[in-house]
Structure formats: structure tokens, C-alpha cells
Image (cartoon, rainbow, N blue to C red):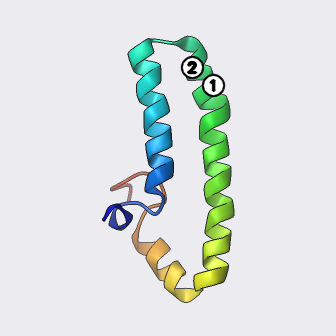
Amino acid sequence: GPYRFVRHPMYLGIVAFHAGATLALESLLLLVVTLVYVVPFTLMRIAAEEKVLREGFGEKWSAYAARVPALVPFGR
């Protein structure tokens, strides 16, 4: 499934949706909202979720996280 490419495919989809909508609508306002709100809060949410997962799954999560990028597929 998608979790072999990225650890957070849902968040990748959210960012991709907003980036695509910004391009499709040619909206400067949506670009600002995406860069100022969507991306930072998505990254904050990922950090919080990663902490919970690391605490819950320990070494298995650490090994998985070392192999699979968090948000950008093929980013390693």
C-alpha cells in the first residue's frame, strides 16, 4: 500500500490537494493560505503523530521511519 512510499499518505494528499487547487485556480490567496497555514500545520501534526507512534511502537517504528520518508515519496 501507500505506506511503503510515505509514512503519512493522507497528509501528502492534503498538501497535494492544496497545491493543485492553487495552481488550477491561479489563486494568490490560496497560495498564501497553503504556505502560511496548511503546510506548517500539517508538518506540526506529523511531528505530533510521529511522537505518539514512536512511543507506541518503539524500535519497530524507528526502523520503519528510517526506511520510509515522512511526506515526500522517493525523498531519500
Figure check: 11 above or below 48 = above
Q: In this image, 75 relative to 33: left or right?
A: left
> Residue at point 61% right, 67% down?
50
- The residue under label 2 is 30
Relative to 25, residue 71 above or below: below
Asked if the residues shown at circle 2 and circle 1 are in contact, with their CB atoms under 8 angstroms apart, the answer is: yes
Quadrant that contains the N terminus: bottom left
Where in the figure is residue 2, as x and y percent of width and height? 34, 61
Q: Quadrant of residue 59?
A: bottom right
Secondary element under disc 2, as helix, strand or loop, is: helix
Please provide percent x and percent y for residue 17.
44, 34
Distance CA(mark 2)–CA(mark 1): 5 Å
Relative vertical location of residue 48 with respect to residue 41 in this rendering, above or below: below
Q: Quadrant of residue 67?
A: bottom left
Q: Amino acid at mark 2?
A: Leu
Residue at image mark 1: 33
Drawn side of residue 35 relative to residue 20, left or right: right
From the image, which quarter does the C terminus lie in? bottom left
